[in-house]
Image (cartoon, rainbow, N blue to C red):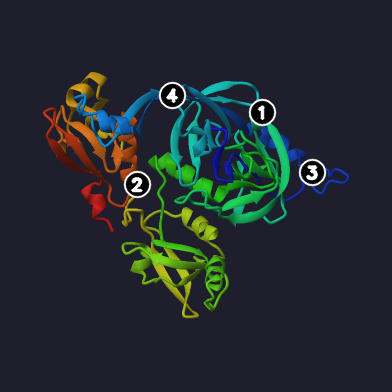
Amino acid sequence: MNKKIFGTLALAFCLGLTTPVMADAVPGQPVDLTYAAEKTVNSVVYIKVTTNSRERTVEYYDPFEDFFGDFFGNGRSNGGRSQRRYQTPPRHGAGSGVIISKDGYIVTNNHVVEEADELMVKLNDNREFKARIIGMDKNTDLALIKIEGEDLPAISIGNSDNLKLGEWVLAIGNPFSLTSTVTAGIVSAKARTLGANAEGIESFIQTDAAINPGNSGGALVNARGELVGINAMIYSQTGSYAGYGFAIPTSIMNKVVDDLKKYGTVQRALLGITGQDVSIYIDAQKAKGNDVDLGTVTGVYVLEVSADGAAAAADLKAGDVILTIDGKTIDKFGQLQEALVNHRPGDKVTVTYMRDKKKHTATLTLRNIQGTTAMVETVDTDEIGVALRPLSENEKKELNLSHGLVVSAIRDGKMKEAGVTKGIIIMQVNDRKMNTTDDFEQAVKEANMSSDRVLWIRAKTQSGLNRSFTVELADEKAKGKK
C-alpha cells in the first residue's frame, strides 16, 4: 500500500535526476528545476487501493485440546494443533503511479497494488478512473496498470544510464496523501543493492530527496523533465524520511513494462550463478585472517554455479570473477543484475572473467529459471480445467477435516489429464495447504516460476482415502527447448 518495511528498509518511494538547465537560472540556485516540475507533475497520479474483507485460517497450538480431545470423544486430537478461521476487515491504502503512455498505461510499485481488489486512479486535474492490473513483477517491485482514456499527460522517459553522481533530481508523488508533492535532491549513488528482497533484482538509484509513505510508485525525474526512476524504497529506522531514498531505474523499468505487455510475465534471463561484490568477498576473507589476491578488487565474485545454467555450459566456475558483460564494466553485483535484466532467455552475451589472475572471455546463451531458452508463459488457473470451492463447515465436520478445496467441476485440461476427478478434495499443493481458492492460484503461480513447473497434489476422496496427483505445467515443446 503506502509503504512496506523490511527491517530498517521502508518501501515507500525514491528519486533520480539528470543535468541542467531548461530555464533562466535562479540566483543562488545551481539549477532551475521549475521546468522539470511543471512538465512532469501532471503525469504522476494518486492511486487509491481497496482490499476486500477476506477469510483467513490460522493454525494454533492448544495443549488442552490435545489432552482432553479423545477423552470427550470429539475425535480431534491432533497433537494439540487446531485451526481457526477469521474474517479480515476491508483495508484501504494509497500510493503513486506514473502515466507512461497517452492511452493510459501507468507504472507503479508491485507492493502498492499486489493485494488490490479495486483500484481508483486520480489525476492531478481531479479526474478519476477505475484501473485494472496488466501485470506485476515482485522481483523488481514493479507493476503495470491501465486506465481507459485518451490524450493523457504521459511523461517523457529518459535513460537512467546517463545519470551522474551529484546530478539534481526531483521526486514527485503523494506522500501522506498530499497530492502532487515535489521534492528535490541529488543522485547520491547508483547500482545500489540493499538485500531487501532475497530473490529480487536490485540496482537502485540512491537519492537524498525527501520522500515519505505514499510516494511509492512515484516519479524520479531529471532536470530535463524526463523519468529516470520509479520511487520504491526508503532507508529509515522510523518508516519516514531519514535522508536516504531509492528508485528503480528506467533501464530496468522499460524491459519489465515491455514484457508485461507482451507476455503477462517478465522474461528473466539468468547466468545461472550466485555471487557477490568482490570487495565484500575480500573483506569477509580478511575478517577470517585469510590473504586474498584475485588479480582484481572490483567485479562480481562467483560463489556458486548452477548445474543447468548458462554459466556452467560455458565452463565458468566458482571462484571466477566477472569483469564485463558485452563490454560493459561490472564493478558490483547491482550492475550485473541491471545488465542482464534487459535480456530474454535465448539471448547471447559475451562475458569477460578473471580466473587465476588471467582474463578469459566466453559467450553464454542465457536461460530462464527452468534452465531452458523458452519464453516463460503465464498459467491461467481457468485453463487448468478445474473449478474449486472451499469445504463448508458442515463438510469439515462430517469428514473430520480442517481444510481443503473440493473439485466442484472439471473439464479437459491438465488436471483431468493427471487423473483428478469431480468430488476430490485437494488438501495440499506443493508445500501450501489449501484453505481458499486464492491458495490454489498462488501455488500455481509459484510452481510456474519454479525450475520444475510441477504441482504435487495431496488429496482425499469423499470416503477418506488418500490420493496424490502430479500436474505438469510445462508444455512438451517448452521442456525440450534447451
Residue 79, located in which quarter of the rendered image? top left
Q: Earlier in the sequence, mark 4 or mark 3?
A: 3
State the separation of the CA atoms marked 2 and 4.
29 Å
Question: Marks 2 and 4: which is nearer the front?
Answer: 4
Other residues around mark 2 within 10 Å, as few (<14) / some (14–19) / many (≥20): some
Q: Residue at x 67, y 28 (%)?
A: 178
Label 1 crowding class (10 Å Cα cut-off): few <14, some 14-19, many 20+? Answer: many
N-terminal label among 2 and 4: 4
Dot label at residue 179: 1
**Residue indicated by mark 4:** 88
Disc 4 packing (10 Å; few <14; some 14–19; many ≥20): few
Secondary structure of the residue carrying tag 4 is loop
Spatial CA span between label 2 and label 1: 37 Å
Query: Could you tell which of marks 2 and 1 lies nearer the N-terminus?
Result: 1
Q: Which residue is mark 3?
A: 32
Q: Position of residue 421 (x, y in %)?
A: 14, 31
CA distance separating discs 3 and 2: 46 Å
Q: Nearer the viewer, mark 3 or mark 2?
A: 2
Q: Looking at the picture, which amino acid does disc 2 mark?
A: Met
Mark 2 lies on residue: 449
| Residue 274 picture location, percent across and down | 43, 62
Question: What's the residue type where badge 1 is placed?
Answer: Thr
On residue 146, the disc is none
Could you tell whether 365 is left or right of 203 in the image? left
Image point (57%, 69%), residue name? 283
